[in-house]
Amino acid sequence: MTLEGWFSNASFVATALFLAGFAAAPTFSLAQGVAPPLVGGGLVSVAVINQERLFNGSAEGQRIIAEFDRQANELARENRQLERQLGAEERELTERRKSADPDEFRGLAAEFDRKVNGIRAAQKRKLEALFARREQSRSGFLTRAVPVLLSAMRERGIKIILNQQAVLLATDDMDITDEAIEWLDRAFPIEQDQGEDP
């Protein structure tokens, strides 16, 4: 068994991160199953938030992203180190084939295959755990954001906040994403100050 198709590709982790992206991240709304903007003959105050920009633009969101990137880069470095290590072992095994007894070599090759498969499975579990932690951190951010936004809604007289991705048409003045980022940055000063702490 060679290392082609897994370790010898340019970057196992980088490819996985690119394919996954943040496209599958959970969405949230402060109004589930709400009535249309006209309620009881009067207008209901509605605002719009770009959820991606809210997360990416807030200090806490950026801290989460930076920590994810740090761990992803660390895993990528580990994969490259394992690639070099196993590549050297494979070359050594190829050289031994020239002089080794066929039965002995088959045993050595089978042992090497088991080692490669074991490492591949372990690194895959690490990658899956990394993405799970990312999604957990993002979900936690959105959960903590809800009471902050609700408080600001009461102060502003806003009855409904919609995710911009679910809105067909809206005027620019309905978008309060920048204000919401400021609210969250004020609400999470400890997380903001701790920034890069592990």
Image (tube, helix red, strand yellow):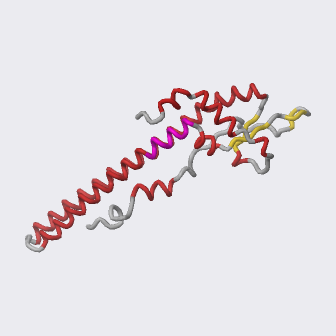
159 sits to left or right of 143: right
What secondary structure do most residues of the magenta stretch adopt? helix
177 sits to left or right of 194: right
Q: Is residue 15 above or below residue 149?
A: below
Image coordinates for residue 46, horizontal then vertical, percent: 79, 37
117 sits to left or right of 36: left
Residue that appears at 8% across and 70% down: 100
Residue that appears at 64% across and 40% down: 28
Residue 106 is covered by the magenta coloring: no
Residue 62 is covered by the magenta coloring: yes
Question: Which one is in front, 191 or 129?
Answer: 191
In magenta, the rendered stretch is 59-69
Question: Which one is in front, 128 or 13?
Answer: 13
Residue that appears at 53% across and 52% down: 21
Residue that extends furthest to the front in the rendered view of this protein:
193
Residue 27 quadrant: top right
Question: Which one is in front, 109 or 194?
Answer: 194
Q: Is residue 93 above or below residue 188?
A: below
Image coordinates for residue 129, horizontal then vertical, percent: 41, 44
Q: Is residue 146 above or below residue 26?
A: above
Question: Which one is in front, 97 or 83?
Answer: 83
126 sits to left or right of 144: left
Q: How many tags in the picture?
A: 0
Which quadrant: the N terminus? bottom left
Residue that appears at 36% across and 49% down: 75
Which quadrant: the C terminus? top left
Image coordinates for residue 71, horizontal then vertical, percent: 40, 45
Residue that extends furthest to the right in the rendered view of this protein:
41
Image coordinates for residue 122, horizontal then vertical, percent: 32, 50
Residue that extends furthest to the bottom in the rendered view of this protein:
98
